[in-house]
Image: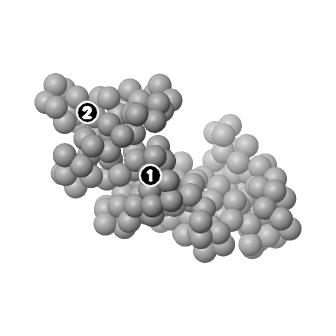
Amino acid sequence: MDEGDRWEAAQEGAERLREGDVEGAIEELERLVLEEPDNEYGYYFLGSAHFEKGDLDKAMKGFVVALEKAPGYIGAMVHLGHTLRLLGRYDQALRMGQQVLARDKHDADALYLMALTHYAVGDEAAAKAYLERFLATNPEVEVAQEATGLLEILAGKAQPLEE
């Protein structure tokens, strides 16, 4: 089965995920990876579904297996990085971001991962630099607003919301 076929096979689960049917996506994608254990996209979308559900350990497993199947899978690297960041595994999250940026120094998703991770560890100068580089990629409006808001917090012009 070639890459295009593997991608196509994962689209039912991916579509359920896009529609907000996380449980349905998980069910479909678990079925897929049992039938096609080498389908990196099945594992990637399964990891994404678990991420949406808030089950970060299962999300991490999905992204790791996707990378075992396809070591150069940038999307899986970035999503694994965000999962590691949310788990407080900042050094590993930074390494994921660095691996992506070594392939493409302008990768917007990796720049944003690096910015958020540096912010999480209190490295404001690095967070600011990565946010500025991220904004230079002309990201979608919603995430650009988030990045701009974080820059305002770093500049002392705004206060972070209490969680």
The answer to whether any part of residue 59 appears in the image is no
Answer yes or no: is residue 144 visible: yes
Residue 3 placement (x, y as % from top left):
78, 61
- Residues tagged 1 and 2 counted as in contact (Cβ below 8 A): no
Q: Is residue 80 left or right of residue 121?
A: right
Q: Residue, x 28% and y 34% (percent of image)?
A: 150
Q: Nearer the viewer, residue 139 or 133?
A: 133
Q: Amino acid at mark 1?
A: Lys
The answer to whether 163 is drawn above or below residue 99 in the figure is: above
Residue at 41% from the left image edge and 30% from the top image edge: 144
In which quarter of the view is residue 94 placed? bottom left
Mark 1, Cα crowd under 10 Å, few <14 / some 14-19 / many 20+, is: few
Residue 97 sits in quarter: bottom left
Viewer-proximal residue, 45 or 135? 135
User: Which dot, 1 or 2, sits closer to the camera?
Assistant: 1
The secondary element bearing badge 1 is classed as loop
Type of amino acid at the residue the image marks with label 2: Leu
Q: Is the residue 84 above or below the residue 162 in the image?
A: below
* Location of mark 1 (residue): 105
Name above or below for residue 128 compared with residue 56. above
Specify whether 55 is left or right of 131.
right
> In which quadrant is the C terminus drawn?
top left
Residue 72 found in image quarter: bottom right
| Most distant residue in the left direction | 156
Task: Residue 83 in the image: state x and y as whole percent.
Answer: 44, 58
Task: Please indicate whether residue 138 sits to the left or right of residue 3 in the image.
Answer: left
Residue 151 numbered mark, or none? 2
Q: Quadrant of the N terminus?
A: bottom right
